[in-house]
Image (cartoon, rainbow, N blue to C red):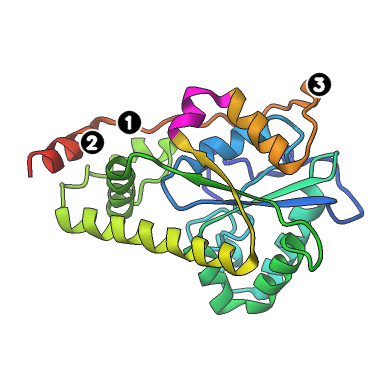
Amino acid sequence: MNHGVVTGYEAEFDFPTRDRPPERPWLFASVPRSGSTYVSHLLWGTGCLGAPLEYLNFEPSGPYGFASESPAAQHDIWRGALHRRTSPNGVFGLKAFPLQLEGVHQSNPALVAQVMRELFPRGGEARVVQLHRRDATAHAISYARALLSGIWRKEQEPDERPEPEYSSTALAHAARLIEQQEAIWRDMFRDLRVEPLALWYEDVLANPEEAVRAVADHLGVRLDPGAAIAVPAIERQSQTGARAWAERHAGG
């Protein structure tokens, strides 16, 4: 975990522990810097759509970095998430990025196979919500700056790391990574014959209530206002550097 930063993975945010698998698992598919953290917390706050966070993020700087070299610990984390991050109505969500899944598959293929069986049961109904970002330039700028600076959350900004200098090379690289990961999802869902619900980050910002209703309808879940819970707030990072990059990009 990131010391001193509330991420939402802490035990205090668990749902009551269950002794059986979720009845309605679903995948929240996206790519980095698409606004997925904001959207996942928005859905989580309903108390009816699970807590769709990155339970397969074993990168050293991620929420479960301590398990990066331990397949056994990774299996334990996944089983724990199923038991403690399923909302009382039986809904469990997993947020994932393609490169994240590929990384886990390389080091722990058995876990990825298990996850796929549970999210896409043979003969069962697969449920997928996919988040996109309409402004491709802003998306690439956000990804490039995060890759260069190592700053991915608002809480990391006060550590006085220098603002990354504009780089057309880094921007092009980020755009390629986004397209590659979008293509991975397209191929995967085509092969699985799954039709995801498409959400657009800009639309969610404009009308979050409508987005929540669309997800609930897609998953076949009835929203109960009385089930809403408090989840960690997601603050938007400073846009000053991003605007400077956009001006440089527009000016050629």
> Could you tell me which residue is drawn at 30 percent across and 48 percent down?
140
Please say if the residues under marks 2 and 1 sit with CB atoms less than 8 Å apart.
Answer: yes
Name the N-terminal-most of marks 2 and 3. 3
Residue 116 position in % (x across, y down): 69, 67
Give the position of the C terminus as an image quadrant: top left
> Could you tell me which residue is drawn at 69 percent across and 42 percent down?
51
Total marks placed:
3
- Specify whether residue 97 is painted magenta: no
Residue 2 position in % (x across, y down): 52, 48
Q: Amino acid at mark 3?
A: Gly
Tag 2 residue = 241
Name the N-terminal-most of marks 3 and 1. 3
Nearer the camera: disc 3 or disc 1 = 3
Residue 168 position in % (x across, y down): 15, 53
Report the Cα–Cα distance between label 2 and label 1: 7 Å
Tag 1 residue = 238
- Which residues fall within the magenta stretch? 202-208
Mark 2: few/some/many CA within 10 Å (<14, 14-19, 20+): some
From this view, report whether residue 64 is shown above or below residue 202: below
Q: Amino acid at mark 2?
A: Gly
Tag 3 residue = 226
